[in-house]
């Protein structure tokens, strides 16, 4: 098992979450524009009302499916946090490295404010799309608090592991070693 968690997870994971949030907003904006234009074309084409109803219902279903990403966003956040905490526990760094981690705390906090500004700029540009994603918008508009909580939890888990925990982890790793 060579995977280890670190304080740097609080930098990389928010970048990932920001990319997902911006991609979601842009995707929904493009879809909504397509849906509006396509519905207008179908209504002017003179097709039967059955075709129009089926098409608009299908378009509405796709739009609803895209909006469910808002409910999946906190689950993705919690899942990434759980994996990060598990790997941070497996790392078990010495308290001496806590002083080095203060540098990562500062960088992560500065980047979190940058992420907030980037998301705010994108959401202001796509202001017709943002109201459909309130949970995602709330988390991204409070990225500094999310990153601070992430750093705090990782630091607590990483730097408070005892010698007894180290011994039990080493024993379990030796028991399952296939070498």
Image (spheres, rainbow, N blue to C red):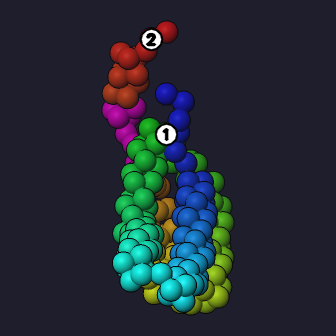
Total label count? 2
Residue pointed to by mark 1: 91
Q: Which mark identifies residue 164?
A: none
* In the image, residue 159 lies in the stretch drawn in magenta: yes
**Residue 102 in sight in this render:** no
- Point out residue 58 in the picture as x, y percentages from the top left corner: 41, 71
* 64 in the magenta segment: no
Q: CA distance from mark 1 to mark 2?
A: 21 Å
- In magenta, the rendered stretch is 157-167
The local secondary structure at tag 1 comes to: helix
Which one is nearer the viewer's eye here, 138 or 175? 138
Residue 8 seen in render: yes
Mark 2 element type: loop
Q: Quadrant of residue 76?
A: bottom left
Residue 54 in which image quadrant:
bottom left
Residue drawn where x is 47% and y is 81% of the image: 47
* Classed neighbour count for the residue bearing mark 1: other residues with Cα under 10 Å, few (<14), some (14–19), many (≥20): some
Query: Is 78 in front, or is 113?
Result: 78
Give residue 63's position: percent from left, percent from top.
44, 74
Residue 151 versus residue 138 in the image, above or below? above
Seen in the picture, residue 17 relative to 53 is either above or below; the reply is: above
Question: Residue 71 versus residue 171: which sits nearer the camera?
Answer: 71
Q: Is residue 23 or residue 49 the one in the foreground?
A: 49
Q: Return the residue found at the far top.
A: 179
Q: Which residue is mark 2?
A: 178
Residue at horizontal 33 percent and vertical 27 percent from the top: 168
Residue 163: quadrant of the picture: top left
Vertical comparison of 131 with 23: above or below: below
Residue 87 left/right relative to 21:
left
């Amino acid at each position: 098992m060579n995977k280890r968690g670190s304080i740097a997870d609080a930098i990389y994971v928010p970048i990932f979450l920001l990319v997902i949030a911006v991609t979601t907003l842009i995707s929904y904006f493009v879809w909504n524009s397509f849906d509006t234009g396509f519905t207008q074309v179908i209504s002017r084409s003179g097709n039967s009302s059955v075709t129009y109803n089926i098409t608009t219902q299908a378009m509405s279903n796709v739009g609803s499916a895209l909006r469910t990403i808002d409910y999946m966003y906190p689950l993705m956040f919690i899942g990434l946090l759980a994996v990060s905490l598990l790997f941070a526990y497996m790392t078990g760094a010495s308290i001496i490295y806590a002083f080095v981690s203060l540098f990562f705390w500062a960088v992560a906090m500065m980047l979190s404010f940058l992420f907030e500004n980037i998301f705010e700029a994108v959401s202001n540009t796509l202001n017709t799309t943002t109201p459909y994603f309130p949970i995602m918008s709330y988390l991204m508009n409070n990225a500094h608090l999310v990153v601070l909580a992430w750093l705090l939890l990782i630091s607590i888990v990483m730097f408070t592991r005892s010698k007894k925990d180290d011994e039990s982890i080493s024993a379990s790793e030796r028991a399952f070693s296939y070498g």
